[in-house]
Structures are given as structure tokens and as C-alpha cells.
Image: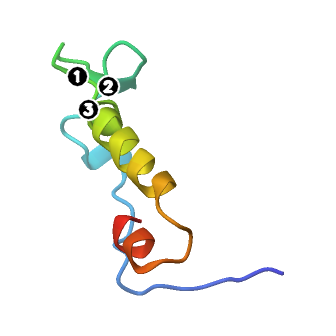
Amino acid sequence: MSLSLEDKSVPSLIPTDNIKTAVGIDVGLKEFLTTNTGETVSVPNFYRKAQSNLARKQRKVSRKEIGSNNWKKAR
């Protein structure tokens, strides 16, 4: 199956001759991203910070009887 759509709200491309400045971005493993000016952004660790809380909640769910109202609340 193939779909083809046309969106009139998408702006047209700017010719490369009209571009005054450009920023190079490198995505890596140690740093989330580094720009060509040397600015770095650290890796966001949302999942790692929430892992212990998530594990505790999963243990609580596993102790409930499957299908019960308390199981549904814990889930």
C-alpha cells in the first residue's frame, strides 16, 4: 500500500544562496548533541531516573490478583 499526500501548509525550501549562517550538530553517545560552536547538551536520563520507582510499582502490580480492582488501580 502506498499513500501520497500534499500539504499546502509546508513552506517552500530556502535556496542555499540565501542562507547567512548555519549550525552543525553532532549527535553522540557521551553527549546528547554538540554544535559546531562547541556547545554541548548532556544526555537526558528520564528513564534511568525513573527506573527504581518503576520497578517498585511493577512489584506492587505483580503481587495483586490479576483482573481485580486493586490490580487495575496499581497498573
Q: Would you name the residue on which mark 2 appears? A: 32
Residue 48 found in image quarter: top left
Depth check, mark 2 against mark 3: the one in front is 3
Q: Would you name the residue on which mark 3 appears? A: 49
Q: Earlier in the sequence, mark 3 or mark 1?
A: 1
Q: Residue at x 31, y 17 (%)?
A: 31
Vertically, is 11 above or below 64?
below
Give the x, y percent position of residue 42: 22, 22
Give the x, y percent position of residue 23: 25, 31
Q: Would you name the residue on which mark 1 appears? A: 42
Mark 1: amino acid: Ser
Q: Earlier in the sequence, mark 2 or mark 3?
A: 2
Q: CA distance from mark 3 to mark 1?
A: 14 Å
Mark 2 secondary-structure assignment: loop
Q: Residue at x 28, y 40 (%)?
A: 53
Vertically, is 10 above or below 62?
below
Mark 2: amino acid: Phe
Depth check, mark 3 against mark 1: the one in front is 3
Within 10 Å of disc 3 (Cα), the crowding (few <14, some 14-19, many 20+) is: few
In contact (CB < 8 Å): disc 2 and disc 1: yes
Q: Residue furthest right?
A: 1
Is 52 in front, or is 4?
52
The N terminus lies in quadrant: bottom right
The C terminus lies in quadrant: bottom left
Within 10 Å of disc 1 (Cα), the crowding (few <14, some 14-19, many 20+) is: few
Give the x, y percent position of residue 18: 26, 48
Q: CA distance from mark 2 to mark 1?
A: 5 Å
Mark 3: amino acid: Lys
Q: Residue at x 36, y 64 (%)?
A: 74
